[in-house]
Image (spheres, rainbow, N blue to C red):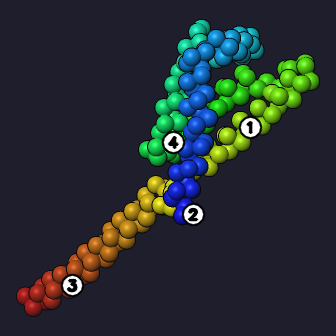
């Protein structure tokens, strides 16, 4: 199978989790909002006042924003439109959900702890896949490489033009010296 169809299928499969999760979060925000509220309250109690003041009072709104970001990022990733930025946005949405929903370290029940640990590891796998998707240039040179090449070409042109100007100045200077000798 050529690389392009594999890339398209892989991006679509990766995006499906986020679109479905985002739709679910919009339809049923209360459980996620409750977890986000608990995390926000805990963060306000432990963080310095300057950081604690920046934590929103309505974590339910953040849950909705996160859900919309997951849906939009998933659609963009699956469609192949701006897949690298979409993958970065999706990667940023994984972290809050992982911390609030997969908190196996705080779970006393061994069965639920095992389930949350499995979910935590799944989220880490998704994060890894998103980081790969964010760095995938689809066989094209990266923007950084293209910028360095353009700069190198520009520097070469400037050096060549400078050398030509110096050569022309030397010739002109020699000519002027010759004229001065003849007249002097």
**Residue tagged by mark 4?**
77
- Give the mark nearer the N terminus: 3 vs 4: 4
C-alpha gap between disc 3 and disc 1: 72 Å
The residue that appears at 60% across and 22% down in the rendered structure is 24
Label 2 SS: loop
Q: What is the crowding at mark 4: few (fewer than 14 residues within 10 Å), some, or many (at least 20)?
A: many
C-alpha gap between disc 3 and disc 4: 60 Å
- Give the mark nearer the N terminus: 1 vs 4: 4
- Farthest residue, direction top: 57
C-alpha gap between disc 1 and disc 4: 19 Å
Q: What is the crowding at mark 1: few (fewer than 14 residues within 10 Å), some, or many (at least 20)?
A: some
**Residue 171 shows which numbered tag?**
3
Taking 53 as reference, is 79 left or right?
Answer: left
Q: Is residue 148 above or below residue 18?
A: below
Q: What is the crowding at mark 2: few (fewer than 14 residues within 10 Å), some, or many (at least 20)?
A: few
Label 1 SS: helix
- Residue 53 position, x and y percent, is 61, 11
**Residue tagged by mark 2?**
1
- Give the mark nearer the N terminus: 2 vs 3: 2
- Farthest residue, direction bottom: 182
């Amino acid at each position: 199978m050529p690389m392009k169809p594999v890339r398209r299928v892989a991006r679509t499969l990766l995006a499906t989790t986020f679109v479905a999760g985002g739709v679910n979060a919009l339809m049923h925000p209360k459980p996620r909002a409750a977890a986000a509220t608990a995390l926000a309250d805990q963060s306000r109690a432990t963080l310095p006042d300057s950081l604690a003041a920046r934590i929103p009072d309505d974590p339910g709104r953040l849950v909705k924003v996160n859900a919309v970001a997951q849906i939009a990022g998933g659609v963009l990733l699956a469609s192949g439109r701006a897949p690298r930025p979409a993958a970065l946005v999706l990667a940023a949405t994984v972290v809050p959900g992982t911390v609030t929903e997969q908190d196996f370290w705080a779970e006393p029940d061994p069965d639920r702890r095992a389930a949350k640990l499995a979910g935590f590891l799944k989220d880490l796998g998704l994060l890894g896949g998103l980081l790969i998707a964010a760095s995938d240039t689809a066989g094209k040179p990266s923007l950084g490489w293209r910028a360095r090449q353009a700069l190198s070409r520009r520097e070469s042109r400037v050096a060549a033009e400078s050398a030509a100007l110096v050569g022309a100045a030397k010739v002109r200077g020699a000519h002027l010296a010759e004229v001065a000798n003849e007249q002097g």
